Amino acid sequence: MEPEFWHERWSQQQTHFHQPDGHPMLNKWWPTLELGTDAHVLVPLCGKTPDMRTLAERGHRVTGIELSPIAAQDFFIEQHLAVDSDEIGGFDRYRAECGAGTIEILVGDFFTADTETLGAFQAFYDRAALIALPQTMRARYVEHLCTLLTKDAPGLLITLDYDQSQMNGPPFAVDTAEVNTLFEHRGEVASLENGSRLGGQDMLAQRGVKSADEYVFRITATD
């Protein structure tokens, strides 16, 4: 899971994990976070997901962090958005107005992001970040993610669970028990929905996974 792995995936367009129509559960469950319209939302390891556009059209300020410049550039091309670029805190930044909100993608290492440079985020959306990482990296990811959030920032998290022996991820299997362990220090972990046809299973079937469940969680920070 070195950076070269992901750079090679994007350069060779081996992006079976990408959902060109976005995730069907985002619009259903995002309103339960009860955010202000202009909330600043973090989308870690964002790839080129159109879910960022969905969030921006709600009026949010959306910041994606992504290792691959190909993914970032492709996003704005495919979404037909006029983009400006500059640098911030060691990241190459691409930015565009979108609907009532804005979208920026910071290209670089997620683990170098900090609130001193970017400010603290008021919510997060993780559709494919946690499951992109092997188990040895997931606790570190969650710990760093939480350092980028305001004290009361909620989040929407989507994971997959399947027989890991059928495919060596990514995406990796992350079950409910692990999600609870990873986020229990943050606050309440609510399982909102699960099922075998929420989105993304066709990609798994092509890679030999016979069945998989997808889970939608709301992470609510508590004192």
Image: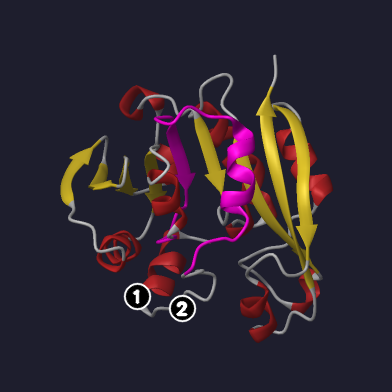
Q: Residues within 10 Å of mark 2 (few under 14, many from 20)?
A: few
* Residue at 31% over, 59% down: 72
Contact flag, marks 2 and 1 (Cβ < 8 Å) = no
Looking at numbered disc 1 in the image, what kind of residue is underneath it?
Ser
Q: Amino acid at mark 2?
A: Gln
Q: Is residue 114 magenta?
A: no
Q: Is residue 145 left or right of residue 178?
A: left
**Where is residue 25 drawn, in percent x and y?**
63, 55
Was residue 41 drawn as part of the magenta stretch in this picture?
yes
List x then y, in percent, for residue 170: 61, 67
Reply above or below: 54 against 150. Answer: below
Q: Nearer the viewer, residue 178 or 52?
A: 52
* Distance of label 2 from label 1 (alpha carbons): 8 Å
Residue in the foreground of this view, choosing between 126 and 196: 196
Task: State the SS at label 2.
Answer: loop
**Could you say which quadrant of the image residue 117 lies in?**
top left
Residue ID at (37%, 25%): 119
Q: Dot 1: what SS?
A: helix
Which mark is on residue 215? none
Instruction: Name the image quarter holding residue 23.
Output: bottom right
The picture quadrant where one finds residue 166 is: bottom right
| Disc 1 residue crowd, few under 14, some 14–19, many 20+, Cα 10 Å | few
Give the answer, above or below, for where 185 lies relative to 99. Answer: above
Mark on residue 11? 1
Closer-to-camera residue (66/121): 121
Its colouring scheme is secondary structure
Q: Residue at 38% of width from left, 55% of height from top?
A: 67
* Residue position for label 2: 14
Residue ID at (65%, 83%): 207
In the shown orientation, is residue 127 left or right of residue 86? Answer: right
Q: Which residues are magenta?
A: 21-49
